C-alpha cells in the first residue's frame, strides 16, 4: 500500500493532542480491543483491556525480568504487566512528552514507580545497551515507525537471545485498490501511520524466529466502528481541545476503516535468535 512514511515528531504531536480522548474511551489504553466472538457484548474499553492482557501474557516475564514497552502510550500495558508479574521491571518509551508525563504520574499513583520507568525515546534509536531486556512488546506502535525494519532491528539489539517480542498491530493483508485503498491511505495520513507489510519477513531479517502469528482481524477490526460511535457520544466534551473538523474526520475514518478487508490486525510472538 502506498501510504507514506510517518514522521516521529508528527506522531508525538498527534498523541500529545489525542491521548486524553483515547484514554477516556478505552479505559486508559490507546489501542483497539479484542472481542471473543460475534455474541460478545463487551464494551470497547473491556475489549481493549482484553487485548492488553493477551499481549502482556505472551511476553513471558518473570520475577526480575527487564521488559521494554515500545510505544507505551499512557502506560496502561506497562503497569498491567508490572502489577500482574511481581518484581518484573518495565521500561516504557514514547515520542509523546504528554504520554510520558501521564504514565509517570500513574506509576506513582499505583506505587510502582520504582520498577516501572517511562522515558521519551525513539524506537529507531533506542538509548539502551545490547541484550539489556528479557522481553518486549509493541502494541500499535510499529505502524507509526518511519522505518519499520530499522525499528525491529533496534529492538532485536536490546533484547537478549531467547527473549520474546510480542506485537499487536495493523497489517497489510493484501494489496488494496479502489475505494478501500482510498480509505486506508486517508486513515494512515490522518493517524500518522503506515500499515505493516510482510511482518514475518521483517522479523526474520531483524533476527527473530516467529513463534505465533495469528490474524485476529475478525475479533478486532469492529473496534474502529465501535470507537467511532463512542467518539460521537463524547464529541461535545472534546471539540474545544481538538479541532472539530479533525475530530469529525476521525469519526468517519474509523467507521470506514472497520469495514476494509485489505488491512487487518495481527497478534505475533517472535523470539530473538
Image (cartoon, rainbow, N blue to C red):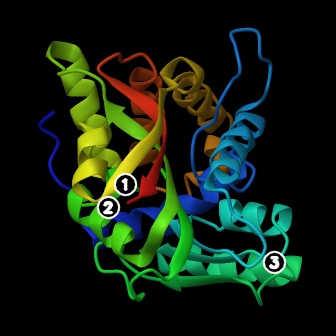
Q: Secondary structure at mark 2?
A: helix
Q: Quadrant of residue 264?
A: top left
Give 63 or 111, whichever is nearer the viewer: 63
User: Is there a contact, CB below 8 Å, between mark 2 and mark 1?
Assistant: yes
Give the quarter of the image for residue 205: bottom left
Query: Residue 236 at what x, y percent from top left?
Result: 65, 45
Q: Residue at x 46, y 54 (%)?
A: 271
The percent coordinates of residue 131 (x first, y second) are 44, 80
Q: Residue at x 27, y 59 (%)?
A: 206
| Residue that mark 1 sits on | 142
| Whole-percent x, y for residue 154 in the image | 31, 72
Contact, mark 3 vs mark 2 (Cβ under 8 Å): no
Q: Nearer the viewer, residue 171 or 160?
A: 160
Disc 3 from disc 2: Cα separation: 26 Å
> Which residue, given by chain and number where applicable, does mark 2 sit on?
152
Residue 160 lies left or right of residue 226; in this view the side is: left
Q: Residue at x 49, y 62 (%)?
A: 162
N-term-proximal mark, 2 vs 1:
1
Q: On the rendered structure, is 257 left or right of 38?
A: left
Of callouts 3 and 2, which one flags the residue occurring earlier in the amino acid sequence?
A: 3
Residue 250's tag is: none
Q: Quadrant of residue 260?
A: top left
Q: Secondary structure at mark 1?
A: helix
Residue 136's place in the image compared with 237, above or below, is below
Query: Is 180 drawn above or below residue 128 in the view shown?
Result: above
Residue annotated with mark 3: 87
Q: CA distance from mark 2 to mark 1?
A: 8 Å
Residue 33 to residue 262: above or below = below
Up/down of 126 relative to 169, above or below: below
Task: Give the mark, 1 or 3, whose residue is nearer the N terminus.
Answer: 3
Who's the residue at 60% across and 33% down the image? 227
Locate residue 212 relative to residue 5 in the image: left or right. Answer: right
Amino acid at each position: 500500500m502506498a501510504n507514506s512514511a510517518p514522521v516521529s515528531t508528527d506522531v508525538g504531536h498527534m498523541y500529545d493532542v489525542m491521548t486524553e480522548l483515547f484514554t477516556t474511551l478505552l479505559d486508559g489504553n490507546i489501542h483497539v480491543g479484542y472481542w471473543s466472538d460475534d455474541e460478545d457484548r463487551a464494551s470497547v474499553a473491556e475489549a481493549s483491556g482484553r487485548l492488553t492482557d493477551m499481549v502482556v501474557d505472551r511476553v513471558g516475564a518473570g520475577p526480575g525480568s527487564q521488559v521494554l514497552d515500545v510505544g507505551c502510550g499512557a502506560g496502561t500495558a506497562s503497569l498491567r504487566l508490572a502489577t500482574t508479574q511481581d518484581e518484573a521491571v518495565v521500561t516504557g518509551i514514547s515520542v509523546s512528552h504528554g504520554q510520558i508525563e501521564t504514565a509517570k504520574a500513574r506509576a506513582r499513583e499505583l506505587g510502582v514507580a520504582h520498577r516501572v520507568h517511562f522515558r521519551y525515546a525513539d524506537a529507531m534509536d533506542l538509548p539502551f545497551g545490547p541484550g539489556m531486556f528479557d522481553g518486549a512488546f509493541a502494541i500499535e506502535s510499529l505502524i507509526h515507525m518511519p522505518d519499520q525494519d530499522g525499528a525491529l532491528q533496534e529492538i532485536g539489539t536490546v533484547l537478549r537471545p531467547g527473549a520474546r517480542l510480542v506485537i499487536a498491530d495493523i497489517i497489510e493483508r493484501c494489496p488494496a485498490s479502489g475505494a478501500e485503498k482510498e480509505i486506508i491511505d486517508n486513515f494512515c495520513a490522518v493517524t500518522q501511520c503506515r500499515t505493516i507489510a510482510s511482518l514475518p519477513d521483517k522479523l526474520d531479517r531483524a533476527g527473530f524466529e516467529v513463534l505465533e502469528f495469528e490474524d485476529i482481524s475478525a475479533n478486532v477490526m469492529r473496534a474502529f466502528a465501535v470507537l467511532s460511535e463512542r467518539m460521537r457520544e463524547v464529541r461535545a466534551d472534546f471539540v474545544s481541545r481538538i479541532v472539530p473538523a479533525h475530530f469529525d474526520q476521525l469519526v468517519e475514518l474509523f467507521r470506514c476503516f472497520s469495514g476494509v478487508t485489505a488491512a487487518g490486525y495481527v497478534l505475533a510472538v517472535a523470539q530473538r535468535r
